[in-house]
C-alpha cells in the first residue's frame, strides 16, 4: 500500500499515482479514470477506451437526433 498526499490546485485537490501502480495497471497519461466511493473509500478504476468511445458516439447521436427520437417515441 502506498501513501500519497493531497494538494490543492485551483479549487480541486489532486494527488499522484505511484509509478508501480501505473505500471501494474498499464495506465497512460490522459487516460480516463472512473472515481466512485464505497464504504468511506475512494475507488479509482481505468475506463475501458473502447467503451468510452462507444459512449461518446452514443451521446453525440442522442444530442444530434434528440428531436427525431422524441417524435418516434410519441408515435
Image (tube, rainbow, N blue to C red):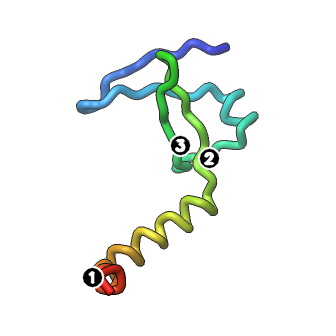
- Quadrant where the image shows the C terminus: bottom left
Q: Position of residue 21 (x, y in %)?
A: 68, 29
- Image x and y of residue 39, in percent: 51, 18
Q: Secondary structure at mark 3?
A: strand
Image coords of residue 34 (percent x, y): 51, 41
Of labels 1 and 2, earlier in sequence is 2
Residue found at x 55% / y 49%: 31
**In the rendered image of this protein, does residue 32 appear above or below residue 44?**
below
3 or 33, nearer to the observer = 33
Which residue is at the front of the view, 1 or 61?
A: 61
- Residue sitting farthest toward the left: 11
Q: Are marks 1 and 2 in contact (CB under 8 Å)?
A: no
> Which secondary structure lies at badge 2?
loop
Binning the other alpha carbons within 10 Å of mark 3 as few (below 14), some (14 to 19) or many (20 upward) gives: few
Question: In the image, is 67 to the left or to the right of 18?
Answer: left
Quote the CA–CA distance across marks 2 and 3.
11 Å
Tag nearer the camera, 2 or 3? 3
Q: Which residue is mark 3?
A: 33
Label located before the other in sequence (1 or 3):
3
Query: Mark number for residue 25?
Result: none
45, 22: nearer the viewer? 45
In this view, the residue in front, 12 or 41, is 41
**Residue at the spot of label 1:** 67
Q: Residue at x 37, y 21 (%)?
A: 7
Q: What residue appears at the point 53 percent right and 43 percent down from the top-left corner?
A: 33
The numbered mark, 2 or 3, whose residue comes first in the sequence reads 2
Give the residue number, with chain letter if any, for mark 2: 28
Amino acid at each position: 500500500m502506498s501513501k500519497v498526499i493531497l494538494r490543492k490546485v485551483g479549487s480541486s485537490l489532486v494527488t499522484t499515482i505511484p509509478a508501480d501502480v501505473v505500471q501494474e495497471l498499464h495506465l497512460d497519461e490522459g487516460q480516463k479514470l472512473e472515481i466512485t466511493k464505497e464504504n468511506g473509500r475512494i475507488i479509482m478504476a481505468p475506463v475501458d477506451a473502447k467503451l468510452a468511445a462507444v459512449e461518446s458516439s452514443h451521446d453525440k447521436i442522442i444530442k444530434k437526433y434528440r428531436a427525431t427520437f422524441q417524435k418516434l417515441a410519441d408515435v
